[in-house]
Amino acid sequence: MLISIITINYNNKQGLERTLKSVQAQTFNDYELIVIDGNSTDGSKHIIEQYKTGLNYYVSEPDTGIYNAMNKGIKQAQGDYLFFLNSGDNLVNESALAKVAKHLSGEDFVYFNINRIKNNKKWVREVPNEMSFFYLHNDTIPHQSIFIKKELFYTVGAYDEHLKLVSDWKFIITALIKYNASYKHVNEVFSNFYEGGVSSSKGSFEAMEKERQLVLKQDFPLLLNDLKYKFKLERTLRTLRKSRKINWLIKLGLINKF
């Protein structure tokens, strides 16, 4: 089984070197490494030249955004599973891919937990075993922790390049909800995500939420209505639980506690 590792980079030469080092140090050999650089001007091209003997494909040219670059990587990938490890992020140790490969058993998505690192502090972000619309409507599976079967891109399509921040989320929720994609969660960590990228600022979070709401309204209006109704019921229940009259009736045994 071949794993395609796709690394997107733009003007992040130090991060790019960290990523390439961690991949090329792996004891597992059944992978290909693809680098898509957005015509960087900070010396990233020198890093690519330095590591090019370990690259199966690389290009440095202008793109229209991160999802345009990711789609370029998908087109070049020959692997059974695709994994996006963008510049700056890395694998936890030299045996990470070997351990991952044991869990790639045919599901459309195989995803793991992930280390998040900020200001030299590290913590584990855990992802649920079971996926649901309730979880996915405002959260996602980090692309640094998920392996995607290449065939799924033929079914669902490439990443939506009209979106700037949440196209990978849209792909996941569309595959799971509309195409009933299979998935498996592995309760282990194999990669590090270093915060500080395009999606880490407060302004980006707000922009991401706007894009998510746009996708939900366009593609999942009925599910979104159900979710709003659920939230309305929960607010009503919280209000009722605080009601003196309701609590008095519960104490008298006239109604059951809820």
Image: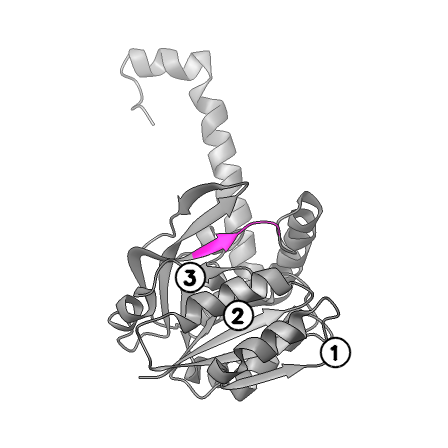
**Given this view, does label 1 or label 2 mark the residue nearer the observer?**
1
The residue carrying pointer 1 sits among few (fewer than 14), some (14 to 19) or many (20 or more) residues within 10 Å by Cα, namely some
Q: Identity of the amino acid at label 2?
A: Phe
The residue carrying pointer 3 sits among few (fewer than 14), some (14 to 19) or many (20 or more) residues within 10 Å by Cα, namely many
Asked which secondary structure carries label 1, the reply is loop
Query: Residue at left 38%, top 52%?
Result: 127
Residue behind mark 2 = 171
Quadrant of the image for the C terminus? top left
Pick the residue in front: 90 or 73. Answer: 90
Considering only order in the chain, which callout, 2 or 1, is on the residue closer to the N terminus?
Answer: 1
3D distance between C-alphas at marks 1 and 2: 24 Å
Q: Is residue 86 above or below residue 46?
A: above
Please indicate, yes or no, whether residue 253 appears anywhere in the rendered image: yes
Considering only order in the chain, which callout, 1 or 3, is on the residue closer to the N terminus?
Answer: 1
Q: Give coordinates of residue 32: x percent, y percent.
A: 43, 82
Q: Identity of the amino acid at label 1?
A: Pro
Pick the residue in front: 15 or 140. Answer: 15
Pick the residue in front: 90 or 69. Answer: 90
Query: Residue at left 63%, top 60%?
Result: 217
Residue behind mark 3 = 145
Question: Which quarter of the picture shows residue 71?
Answer: bottom right
Q: Main secondary structure of the magenta part?
A: strand
Q: Identity of the amino acid at label 3?
A: Ser
Which label was assigned to residue 62? 1
Q: Give coordinates of residue 172: x percent, y percent.
A: 48, 67
Quadrant of the image for the N terminus? bottom left
Query: Residue at left 44%, top 88%?
Result: 78
Going by the image, does 83 lie left or right of 164?
left
- Write the start and end of the magenta stretch as one range: 192-196
